[in-house]
Image (cartoon, rainbow, N blue to C red):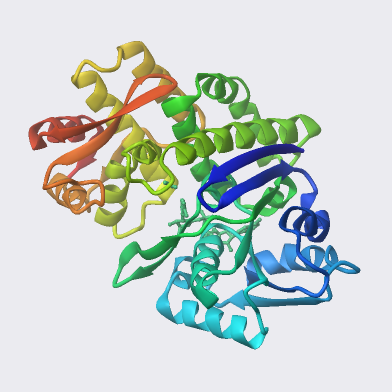
């Protein structure tokens, strides 16, 4: 098991990463959150995740805490980050009799984590939340750093709060039931961490990533594959923790580096009517951002090619051919992005593998030029 601590304004909390941790969830929560035996705990999940993991999670509390309830979010996808589902969750918290000292446990992917985190941050002005992420994306990204949110009027993550968990328990075994495409798409975020911050992580993915996906296809994950996963998750978490500690509330411009590839990605996802999966959009977004960096003389061709080859090797896209998306649309969506400041586009640009900077005031002409090279659009 690996343990990484995050020091936040709401206190320090451990992020535990390892195989089989779910069966010790109760004792871990008891140990790290100091819950008394008469505490009330509400586990929030969805049907798919509950089918595989709710039983183990609940059993882990036996003899430790008696008052364990659960509730399942209705849709099992992004639609659960809504006002309606949030209200349902608040009601479940009231019905379960949760008090200020109670604890909500988010068992699932980023969707379950985001909405449960937001409900916990607002219920009784804030109760404890423990994140138990079951997707690769949630284990390396969304469960860490305290951002919680729901969507409103098709604006993603527009209502939210910063509410740090008391504990994060990432059981690698839960990733065993993830569809291979979800795995692959989430790998874009792991590559992102490597490019912006961790050259060694880049080398590890380069050396073992392809083999790992081959074993996944054969559904034969070996002990070696689990140790590869534990290493890449822990290194990704280390990057996220370091960046969050520098800029917890995203007021210093440092946390923005985590959005490498995302300005292009969000615009591509929106322009495709959300048919393009997030991970694939991030992969192409990183290709575009690296091209922009090279055009501005910030990145050398060797490192640009290294990133290109790794993204390809992991089975992620390096360009987009889509007759339904226009470049004009992509540019206009980019201008609506949260990262735009006074109408000027801001981008995270790599300087080399393992380091990136935020650059402002990039012209439409520069952006269009890289879009022309990579996107075979309308
Ligand atoms: P998700 O939560 O929708 O999960 C994807 C699918 O996998 C769902 O259908 C889910 O039921 C299923 N699933 C989850 N765990 C499984 C398992 N172990 N086995 C089988 N199926 C499983 O998607 P996600 O990619 O985890 O998260 C995406 C969300 O995270 C988005 O809403 C995004 O905005 C948010 N996000 C938040 C942050 C943050 O800092 N808070 C960061 C990045 C992303
Ligand atoms: N996922 C970006 C952040 O947490 O800031």
**Closer to us: 314 or 137:** 137
Q: Position of residue 52 (x, y in %)?
A: 74, 63
Picture quadrant of residue 236: top right
Picture quadrant of residue 55: bottom right
Report how many numbered discs are placed on residues in the image.
Answer: 0
Q: Residue at x 48, y 72 (%)?
A: 122
One can see residue 133 in this view: no
Q: Residue furthest bottom?
A: 95
**Closer to us: 349 or 48:** 349
332 w.r.t. 257: above or below: below
In-image side of 312 versus 153 (left or right): right
Q: Residue at x 42, y 19 (%)?
A: 353
Q: Residue at x 53, y 42 (%)?
A: 184
In-image side of 101 versus 336 (left or right): right
80 w.r.t. 263: above or below: below
Q: Position of residue 268 (x, y in %)?
A: 28, 48
In-image side of 4 versus 36 (left or right): left
- In the picture, the quarter occupied by the N terminus is top right
**Closer to us: 269 or 167:** 167
Q: Position of residue 234 (x, y in %)?
A: 63, 35
Q: Residue furthest right?
A: 63
């Amino acid at each position: 098991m690996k343990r990484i601590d995050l020091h936040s304004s709401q206190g320090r909390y451990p992020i535990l990463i390892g195989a089989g941790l779910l069966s010790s969830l109760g004792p871990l929560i008891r140990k790290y959150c100091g819950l008394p035996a008469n505490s009330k705990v509400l586990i929030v999940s969805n049907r798919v995740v509950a089918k595989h993991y709710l039983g183990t999670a609940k059993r882990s509390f036996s003899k430790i805490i008696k008052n364990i309830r659960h509730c399942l979010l209705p849709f099992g996808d992004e639609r659960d980050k809504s006002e309606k589902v949030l209200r349902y969750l608040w009601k479940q918290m009231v019905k379960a009799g949760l008090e200020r000292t109670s604890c909500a446990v988010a068992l699932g992917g980023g969707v379950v984590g985001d909405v449960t985190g937001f409900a916990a941050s607002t219920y009784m002005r804030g109760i404890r939340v423990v994140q138990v992420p079951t997707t690769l994306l949630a284990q390396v990204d969304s469960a860490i750093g305290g951002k919680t949110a729901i969507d409103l009027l098709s604006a993603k993550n527009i209502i939210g709060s910063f509410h740090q968990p008391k504990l994060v328990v990432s059981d690698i075994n839960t990733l065993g039931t993830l569809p291979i495409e979800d795995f692959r798409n989430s790998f874009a975020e792991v590559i992102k961490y490597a490019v912006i911050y961790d050259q060694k992580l880049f080398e590890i993915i380069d050396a073992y990533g392809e083999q790992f996906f081959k074993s996944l296809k054969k559904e034969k994950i070996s002990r070696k594959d689990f140790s590869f996963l534990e290493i890449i998750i822990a290194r990704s978490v280390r990057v996220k923790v370091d960046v969050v500690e520098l800029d917890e509330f995203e007021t210093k411009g440092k946390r923005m580096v985590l959005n490498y590839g995302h300005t292009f990605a969000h615009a591509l996802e929106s322009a495709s009517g959300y048919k393009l999966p997030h991970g694939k959009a991030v992969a192409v977004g990183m290709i575009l951002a690296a091209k922009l960096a090279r055009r501005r003389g910030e990145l050398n061709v060797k490192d640009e090619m290294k990133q290109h080859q790794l993204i390809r090797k992991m089975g992620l896209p390096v360009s987009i051919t889509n007759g339904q998306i226009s470049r004009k649309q992509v540019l206009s969506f980019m201008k609506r992005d949260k990262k735009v400041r006074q109408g000027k586009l801001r981008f995270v640009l790599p300087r080399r593998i393992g380091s990136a900077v935020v650059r402002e005031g990039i012209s439409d002409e520069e952006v269009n030029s890289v879009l022309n090279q990579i996107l075979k659009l309308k």
